[in-house]
Image (tube, grey):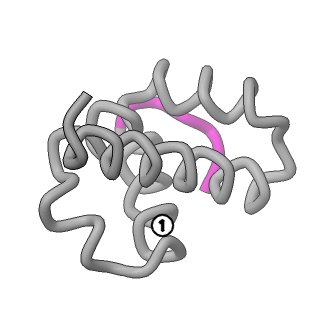
Amino acid sequence: MSKEQKDKLTYMIYCITMFGERYELQPKQAFSYLKRFGGLAFIDECYAAEHLLSLEDAVADMSVICHRNGGGLI
């Protein structure tokens, strides 16, 4: 695994954890929600821009994406 892939994976783990904390979800629940409603795909596809923002901004962006895709958390 390259350094870039490790950095991206670490960032995604932080985002999942922060998302879970924000919505009082266990990490597994946060992962499942984000996967189901497109938050993980978004953070994966937009990593180049998102990792330059704060984790709070990334969590907010994932929340918006998930809400647009039918998620109930906002």
Query: Magenta span: helix, strand or loop, mainly?
Result: loop
Residue 71 counted in the magenta span: yes
Residue 9 counted in the magenta span: no
Question: Is residue 46 placed above or below 55 in the rendered structure?
Answer: above
Residue highlighted by disc 1 = 60
Q: Position of residue 25 (x, y in %)?
A: 82, 41
The part of the chain drawn in magenta is 69-74
In the rendered structure, the answer to whether residue 6 lies left or right of residue 44 reads right
Residue 37: name its quadrant: top left
Question: Is residue 62 placed above or below 57 in the rendered structure?
Answer: above
In the rendered structure, the answer to whether residue 44 lies left or right of residue 39 reads left
Q: Which quadrant of the rendered structure holds the C terminus?
A: bottom right
Q: In the rendered structure, which amino acid carries the disc numbered 1?
A: Ala
Q: Which residue is painted at 39% across and 34% down in the image? A: 40
In the rendered structure, the answer to whether residue 57 lies left or right of residue 27 reads left
Question: Is residue 40 placed above or below 67 in the rendered structure?
Answer: above
* Closer to us: 46 or 37: 46
